[in-house]
Amino acid sequence: MTNAPCAVSDTAKTEMPEGFVPAYLLHSIAFRDDKLLLDLLIPDQGRLRAVARRPGKKQGGRSHWPQFALLAVQLTGRGELKTVRTLEEQRPALQFQGDFLFSAMYLNELLCRIWPQDVGSEQLFALYQHSIHALEAAQPHPGLLQPVLRNFELALLTELGVPVDLEFDAQQQPLDADGWYCWQPEAGLQRIANSAQGQLHWRGASLLAIAGQQWHDDALRVAKQLSRTLLNPLLGHKPLASRALFHR
């Protein structure tokens, strides 16, 4: 089965201080007077929750740790809630503006909402790192924004155990560019009559274009519909706050 199309880089090669692991901060909220509750993304370990002290004077007097910055963290504790003993910035935070900022926030929120806490993954950290760097690189070229998001969503679904095969249907027959397909849960793409009513269906040519990274308008539309079809059951009824930012 063909995985969702996405070029995933290796984990950051920056050398970590002894006893530290690389991390990205996905989300933080206030926790008691001088502490924060952090959602951290750690290589191989997935999303972890940890308590950390607020940054102090040595960190410029700010009140929160930065998102989109490669961090080095030292964690203690064996339970579900870890404690951050030390946290240092290894690289400056990536800078985003406008829809690219909202998109980076969307990646963070999506991971916090659908990736289970303390569930490890060999690829998740590299997938996230690749995607935020791709977003930063795409800022001078707004037309590249949607492909980065769609690739991330489809690759994330694969990591969650919902791989999207864009070359073969549920019967393991090659997709026909002139055929029509719908998504069948736990089966995959199912060929249907082109007169099907009441459900989303897509031309094989558009699905094959996504597999080949040929991001024309119809491929982008189909990729968005397909990813939403698969993500919405995982997200439940609560809307994503970051999605609403695009409509302001």
Image: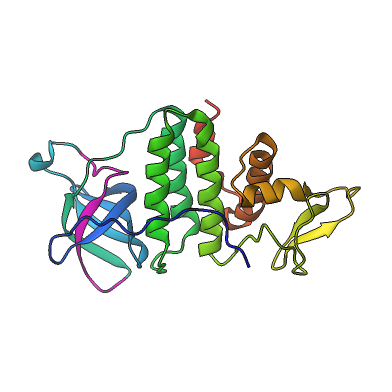
Residue 67 lies in the magenta-colored region: yes
Q: How is the image coloured?
A: rainbow
Question: Quadrant location of residue 174?
Answer: bottom right
Residue 94 lies in the magenta-colored region: no
**In the rendering, at what x and y percent does residue 8 appear?**
43, 56
Question: Quadrant location of residue 186?
Answer: bottom right
**In the rendering, at what x and y percent does residue 61 appear?**
13, 36
Report if residue 6 is visible in the image.
yes
Q: Residue at x 54, y 51 (%)?
A: 153
* Residue range (magenta): 63-79
Q: Quadrant of the N terminus?
A: bottom right
The residue lying toward the viewer, choosing from 98 and 214, is: 214
- Left or right of 48: which side holds 124? right
The residue lying toward the viewer, choosing from 199 and 4, is: 4
Does 123 sit above or below residue 193?
below
Q: Residue at x 37, y 58 (%)?
A: 125
**In the rendering, at what x and y percent does residue 132 appear?**
39, 44
The residue most toward the bottom is 78
The residue lying toward the viewer, choosing from 200 and 194, is: 194
Does 246 sit above or below residue 91?
above
The residue most toward the left is 58
Report if residue 200 is visible in the image.
no
Q: Residue at x 61, y 40 (%)?
A: 215
Does 52 sit above or below residue 163?
above
- Left or right of 239: which side holds 42? left
Question: Quadrant location of residue 168?
Answer: bottom right
Q: Residue at x 20, y 47 (%)?
A: 33
- Left or right of 79: which side holds 61? left
Q: How many marks?
A: 0
The residue lying toward the viewer, choosing from 169 and 176, is: 176
**SS majority, magenta:** loop
